[in-house]
Image (spheres, grey):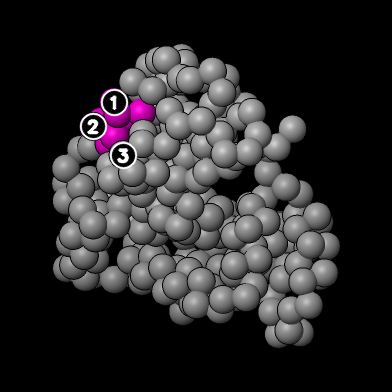
């Protein structure tokens, strides 16, 4: 049977209240145009604020019989329990690296596209991998974030606090960008740990292999593990809505200093 399909938040990292009202609430009670069922897919649920979640919750409590609502989220633990309790939770496994490599190989990309690194960086997300392969700017932005973080480890405290202020300001208009910075830092630090353990074949940021090796010699294993712990704590505090400037200043203050080897 045919089904009517609608999407909310498809081109943005944040589902807005206007989108919920215009694209969802006004449409959800209308009858399907063709089939027996209307399907609504709402992305980035974890980015919703309380007002948005409450708007959605009212519909989830008593959805129309001919409507299926699919909510997409990276982590269900960040959602309101009242929303999760009204849903059937399905955990989707990431696509394997070899499968993404095969997929990219079929996309007729240029020979200069680093598909192996993209496949690893994608962490099982085929759409992200494809976008990164056709849009070099995505990898350039990622490299900028890496350079920012690597700079943190050798910069003065004054320079660290400047970056903290920049990230705090960014958080209020683009919190996902700050989360991506921390996520990039986490992946890079894991690469440093792998390099220090002589497991360079598993490194994700392949193009940064030499610098990763350099930092693996400048940081002790205890320092590397401490950085990973600090990133997780910073993530958690930002998710709990602790004041961003305090969280990020504390992060910068506690980061170990990478000591150059003569």
Residue pointed to by mark 3: 21
Residue stretch in magenta? 46-56
Magenta-colored stretch includes residue 76: no
Which of the numbered marks, if any, corresponds to residue 78? none
Residue closer to the observer: 26 or 247: 26
Q: Tell me what residue is drawn at x 54 percent, y 18 percent.
A: 65
The residue tagged 2 is 51
**Seen in the image, is 256 located left or right of residue 246?**
right
- Res. 106 in view: yes
Structural distance between the alpha carbons of marks 2 and 1: 5 Å
**Coordinates of residue 183 in the picture (x, y in percent):** 46, 53
Horizontally, residue 262 falls left or right of residue 118, namely: left
Q: Nearer the viewer, residue 148 or 104?
A: 104
Badge 3 vs badge 1, beta-carbon distance below 8 Å: no
Q: Position of residue 95 (x, y in %)?
A: 72, 47
Tell me whether circle 2 and circle 1 mark residues in contact (CB < 8 Å). yes
Q: Residue 11: x, y in percent?
A: 45, 57
Picture layout, residue 222 above or below residue 61: below
Q: Secondary structure at mark 1?
A: helix
Residue where numbered disc 1 is placed: 54
Front residue of 189 and 143: 143
Q: Position of residue 12 (x, y in %)?
A: 41, 55
- For the N terminus, the image quarter is top right
């Amino acid at each position: 049977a045919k089904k009517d399909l609608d999407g909310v938040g498809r081109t943005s990292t944040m589902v807005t209240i206007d989108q919920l009202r215009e694209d969802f609430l006004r449409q959800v009670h209308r009858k399907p145009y063709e089939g027996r069922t209307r399907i609504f897919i709402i992305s980035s649920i974890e980015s919703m604020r309380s007002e948005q979640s409450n708007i959605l919750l009212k519909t989830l409590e008593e959805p129309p019989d001919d409507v299926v609502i699919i909510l997409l989220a990276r982590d269900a633990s960040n959602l309101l329990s009242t929303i999760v309790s009204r849903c059937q939770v399905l955990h989707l496994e990431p696509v394997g690296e070899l499968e993404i490599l095969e997929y990219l190989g079929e996309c007729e990309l240029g020979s200069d596209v680093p598909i192996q690194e993209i496949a690893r960086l994608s962490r099982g997300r085929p759409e992200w991998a494809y976008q990164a392969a056709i849009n070099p700017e995505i990898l350039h932005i990622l490299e900028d974030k890496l350079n920012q973080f690597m700079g943190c480890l050798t910069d003065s405290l004054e320079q660290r606090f400047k970056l903290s202020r920049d990230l705090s300001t960014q958080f209020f208009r683009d919190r996902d960008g700050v989360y991506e910075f921390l996520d990039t830092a986490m992946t890079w630090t894991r690469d440093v740990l792998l390099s220090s353990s002589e497991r360079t074949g598993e490194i994700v940021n392949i193009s940064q292999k030499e610098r990763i090796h350099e930092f693996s010699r400048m940081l002790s294993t205890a320092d590397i593990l401490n950085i990973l712990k600090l990133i997780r704590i910073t993530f958690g505090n930002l998710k709990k809505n602790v004041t961003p400037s305090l969280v990020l200043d504390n992060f910068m203050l506690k980061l170990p200093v990478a000591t150059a080897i003569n």
